[in-house]
Amino acid sequence: MKMHVPALLVAMVAVGLPVGGATYNGDLFLGFTAQNGTDLIYDIGPAGSLVAGQSWNVSSYLTGAGITSLSDVKWGVIGDKNVLGIRYAWSTSAETVPSSIPNSAVWGTLDTPARSIASQFTTIGVGQSVSPDSSFDNSWKQQTIAGTLTTQYHNAYGDPNIQGVNSGDFYQVRADGSAPEAIGSFSLTTDGTVRFVPEPGTWKLLGMSLVGFAVVLRRKLFRSA
């Protein structure tokens, strides 16, 4: 029996657009762009799974995307997740502190671009990646730097990028108007390795927010029963 491929799918493949359709699950996206050619977007997993000193060597992925010089590359980490009704967002920043998020409606404007980025993936999970053309609406360049759509990340929230072999602070933001909290930093080295280092004294933020929070909630419910 002959299988018919949808015309839209054929058209997307023909012009080199990413074909995926995965649903966003709250993982963090590590993105790179040389602002021409092909970008790289790499899934590093949920914020709650980060551990001190954790690193990802993405040199082969960068080379595969045609990104060979790291001196001028723009890169960063973004993500968001609804954890038991509490909405969080995470973002790197080279210099300025990200804006606070006053409510869930504004948080949704960050979640929309994250879902759009995720739609390129066939599967969402640690180590999965896509390499869209930098001119594509859901590329790292368009979402975080140059896109003109109001639904793209840098227009909805800000620019999370760091330039070159450098480091930038990593912030956690709750959608309740509270001030963003610096919970660590990400750095890029010359061999294409990205490393996470938690902020001294704030490591509990990630653990309590995403894993410990659920345990504490269960204990409170048990005690009140």
Image (cartoon, helix red, strand yellow):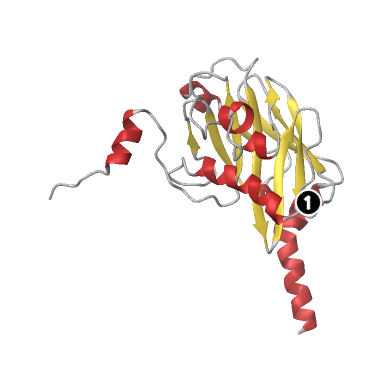
Residue 44 figure quarter: top right
Judge by depth and name the residue closer to the eye, 57 or 67. Answer: 67
Q: What's the residue at 58%, 29% (across, down)?
A: 147
Judge by depth and name the residue closer to the eye, 30 or 187. Answer: 30
Is 205 on the left-hand or right-hand side of 34?
Answer: right
Q: Across the whole image, how many numbered discs are drawn on residues?
A: 1
Q: What's the residue at 70%, 47% (across, down)?
A: 89
Q: Residue furthest right?
A: 201
Q: Residue furthest left?
A: 1
Indicate the amino acid at tag 1: Pro
Judge by depth and name the residue closer to the eye, 79 or 103. Answer: 103
Q: Is residue 16 visible?
A: yes
Tell me residue 126's x, y (percent).
54, 44
Q: What's the residue at 27%, 44% (across, down)?
A: 6
Secondary structure, mark 1, is: loop
Q: Residue furthest bottom?
A: 225
The residue pinned by badge 1 equals 102
Residue 95 figure quarter: top right
On screen, 106 above or below 99? Answer: below
Is 10 on the left-hand or right-hand side of 199?
Answer: left
Q: Is residue 57 visible?
A: no
Crowd around label 1: few <14 · some 14–19 · many ≥20 (10 Å)? some
Tell me residue 64's x, y (percent).
46, 24
Is 22 on the left-hand or right-hand side of 220?
Answer: left
On screen, 221 above or below 99? Answer: below
Identify the image quadrant of the C terminus: bottom right
Tell me residue 77's x, y (percent).
66, 36
Tell me residue 155's x, y (percent).
66, 35
Q: What's the residue at 72%, 35% (across, down)?
A: 92
